[in-house]
Amino acid sequence: MATVTVPGGTGQAPVTYTYTSSAGLTVAQQIANALGAASVAGTLTQATSTSGSISTPTPTTGGGASDVIITGSGATTVTAGSGTGGNYATYAGTSPGNVTVGAGVQLITGTVGGSFAATGANAEIGAIGGNNTITASAAGDTIGGGSGTNLLIATGANDLIVSGGVGDTVSAGSTGANGDTVNVTGSSHDIVFGGSGSMVVGGMGTNETVSAGSGPATIFGGTSGTYFFNNSTAPTFVDEGGANTVVGGSSQVTLFGASGGVINFSTQGSNPGGAVLSSAGIGNETLNAAGSAGPITAWGGTTGSELFVGGSGNDTLIAGGGSDTMTGGAGANLFAQVMSHATGGSLTITDFSATDSFGLYGYGAAAEQSAVNAATGSSITLADGTTITFVGVKVSAIASQIRIG
């Protein structure tokens, strides 16, 4: 168990909230820290109210911070007072609250949950616990769910949504080119929906689900999850070493691999855009795109073991160093070996067919042709010790399908 403490009103004890998890408390903790610092500095003015339409109190110290402590659970609207250096509201009710804050007001809530809304620009709402519904409808708002199960909705531009509960539902990226950022901190089983605006989602945990909208979307994967890019116009997925499922739509998805990561990629729709994978460069990676109907381009790294599996489109699978295994799937595929700083690697191609081609690049045309001519079985050995093996196929039988230089 841990606590967040904010100053109490004049002559009152501090308000202390106890919570069971530190996940998702970034927003609430920042507000509590600011209130505490103002109290220590002697620049904090506080007042108490039950409910209704209220303003933060006028500070007794010019430019000081002001905080209104709300003790009732009735509908309350808080607007920023005048002459303040910071406008705060603290919900200290004992039953679920119903508070709306205007522009520039920062609200910290307790552990009983409730319905909270930011309707003005640059407002903040930080929940500590309970099950909350928190909305942000203006630009530049920040909302954070606590350790409960939360519904977080942002309909403005440039909003920050911090999801830290278990099983949160988030709706973001609703409008405009200046989109929203979703930070999922140490949680699991969350669902995030995007809209027509841009969206960045990071900090994912386990068993997460993201469904992007039509706007640009960048997703940083967690330990496990399923990520639908739908019709996102600029979809990007950044693996962070987990085992994740990525479903592409009409636009080409840019994938960034990670050491130890597994990306299972598929496509949906009648005109799939496929994907381009940039390897992490080191470590073991897997891209399984057997469910993709769009073209796949995958670049291998310099060390480690990589497994690339293409789909039914025309794929391009490129090996560097390390120990790589490639399966092209249906379509007319290009397999390639590019000279790497690492030497003595290996590439195994499991399903080379009459519609496929293979390229050697960076070793010099003469050396590449010599290695192909010298092959007597299913393998080519290059001057740096790198070997390429075509399972079940002799090199001499596919010589016309090999590109040199």
Image: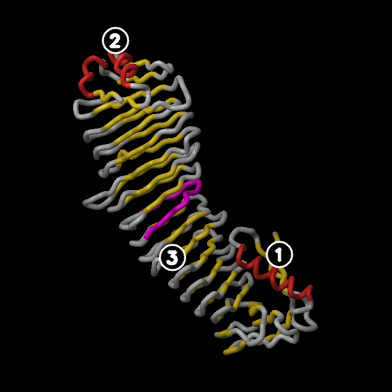
Marks 3/1: CA–CA distance: 33 Å
Q: Is residue 369 visible?
A: yes
Q: Name the colour scheme.
A: secondary structure
Magenta includes 152? no
Q: Nearer the viewer, residue 395 or 75?
A: 395
Q: Is residue 172 visible?
A: no
Task: State how many labels appear.
Answer: 3
Q: Residue at x 73, y 83 (%)?
A: 45
Name which residue type carries label 3: Gly
Q: Tell me if residue 132 comes above or below residue 314 in the rendering.
A: below
Circle on res. 179: 3
Q: Is residue 31 left or right of residue 340?
A: right
Q: Which residue is mark 1?
A: 3
Q: Bounds of the magenta span?
A: 216-228
Residue 364: percent from left, percent from top: 35, 22
Marks 1/2: CA–CA distance: 72 Å
